[in-house]
Amino acid sequence: MSLVVSAWLLFNWLIGSPPKASPKPLDITTQLELAKLAFATVAGLGALVALVTAYRKQRIDEVAQILARQVARDTNHDATERRITDLFGQSVEQLGHEQAPVRLGGLYSLERLAQDNPDHRDTVVSVICAYLRMPFLAQRAPGVARQGVTYPLELLDTLDRPGQQELQVRLTAQGILTKHVFRSTHSNSNYWPGIHLDLSGAELIHFSLSECKVRIANFEGARFIGGAGFRKAEFTQIATFIGASFQGMANFKEANFTHSANFDGAIFQGATDFTKSTFGSMVTFSGTSFDNDVNFTEAKFSGSAIFTSAKFTAATHFNQASLRECTFYGSEFSGFAVFDSARFHAEPDFDGASASHPNDDHSWPGRWRTDPTAATGLAPLVSWE
């Protein structure tokens, strides 16, 4: 304000002030109007000050309410996390209890925790998988507890009472996992998407992932006692069965391996069914043993299919299968192999492979045949022009 007055005075000095006339007294009416104007100005300023004050108070109240809500949310979140941590710790402690009913309670508590708190589902699934990875039958049959060796199904009938109770706990743990990855439950809250199952080295009894959908499944070195069901299962990323052993029937009918699958070194003792299964970028069966009938009828291999040094002991069916790039280098077909109406996008590789001879039940693709000059037994496969 002082700067404005100083500028005004300087301006008047430079241009010269006009001669001052004798002031004319104001009449009563003018004085009243000036007074009204002054009062109105003062009132307006007062109202403006009151408005600014009310606005600032409102803003302060709003900020205080926001902070209060944030503090309440943080407090509730901290309290919830503490409750979850306490429940998780108690549930895990129950899993280590010597009494089977207490272990069952721990499993159901973990399931409820994961159901109500999606952010903790991966952790809960990891804990349940870790429980299943702990030795079970290996402790009761140490003579056959080597990797790649399956246990006779009859061993389950010889379990003592604690063993039978533990069997029920493990079946419950398996059931909890499969319940929440079952594809038909996508429309309700029971489905847990994006699950990663790590059951490497686990002993799985009558295990089934039929019609289930998982992101990653690791069954490396797992032992499937009894049947193993993977009918219409969907693996959206990686499925690993390296060194797994299947004591009973393995049902992979219409299974979908979206990306890669690895069965290297797996042992299939029972009948194996891959009918109408689909394989993505790569599937490998190197060194895999099929000790019973295996069926790949109408299976679709979109990428590389590698059967290097695989062993097919009984009937092998690739009828109407679709294979893009495949190799059976060094494979053995002790039973008979049928490739009727199989479609190959590239010439299959049977170099170094051998098959039972003589055997009129074979039906080889393209120019491949067993060497007719070979002695009885396993004869090399040769390509005839």
Image: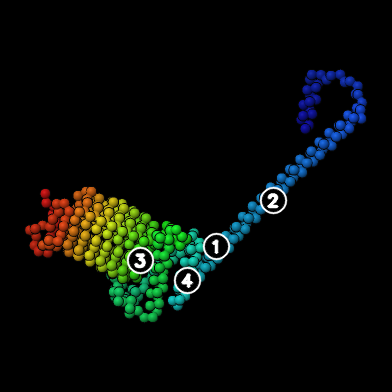
Left or right of residue 111: residue 340 = left
What amino acid type is highlighted by mark number 2?
A: Asp
Q: Name the residue under label 2.
A: 61
| Residues tagged 1 and 4 counted as in contact (Cβ below 8 A) | no
| Label 3 – label 2 distance at C-alpha | 59 Å
Q: Mark 3 points at which residue?
A: 208
Along the line of sight, which residue is nearer the eye, 137 or 358?
358
**Which type of secondary structure does the marked residue at label 2 adopt?**
helix
Along the line of sight, which residue is nearer the eye, 85 or 115?
115
| Residues tagged 1 and 2 counted as in contact (Cβ below 8 A) | no
| Residues tagged 2 and 4 counted as in contact (Cβ below 8 A) | no
Left or right of residue 141: residue 327 = left
Callout 1 crowding tier (Cα within 10 Å): few <14, some 14–19, many ≥20: few
Q: Name the residue under label 1.
A: 81
What amino acid type is highlighted by mark number 1?
A: Glu
Residue drawn where x is 43% and y is 58% of the image: 186
Callout 2 crowding tier (Cα within 10 Å): few <14, some 14–19, many ≥20: few
Q: How many labels does the image show?
A: 4
Earlier along the polypeptide chain: callout 3 or callout 2? 2
Callout 3 crowding tier (Cα within 10 Å): few <14, some 14–19, many ≥20: many
Q: Residue 179 shows which numbered tag? A: none
Residue drawn where x is 30% and y is 76% of the image: 154
Q: Can residue 27 be seen in this view?
A: yes
Q: Mark 4 points at which residue?
A: 106
> Residue 109, percent across and down?
49, 69
Vertical position of residue 96 compared to residue 8: above or below = below
| Label 3 – label 4 distance at C-alpha | 22 Å
| Label 1 – label 4 distance at C-alpha | 18 Å
Earlier along the polypeptide chain: callout 2 or callout 4? 2
Along the line of sight, which residue is nearer the eye, 332 or 339?
339
| Residues tagged 3 and 2 counted as in contact (Cβ below 8 A) | no
**Which type of secondary structure does the marked residue at label 3 adopt?**
strand
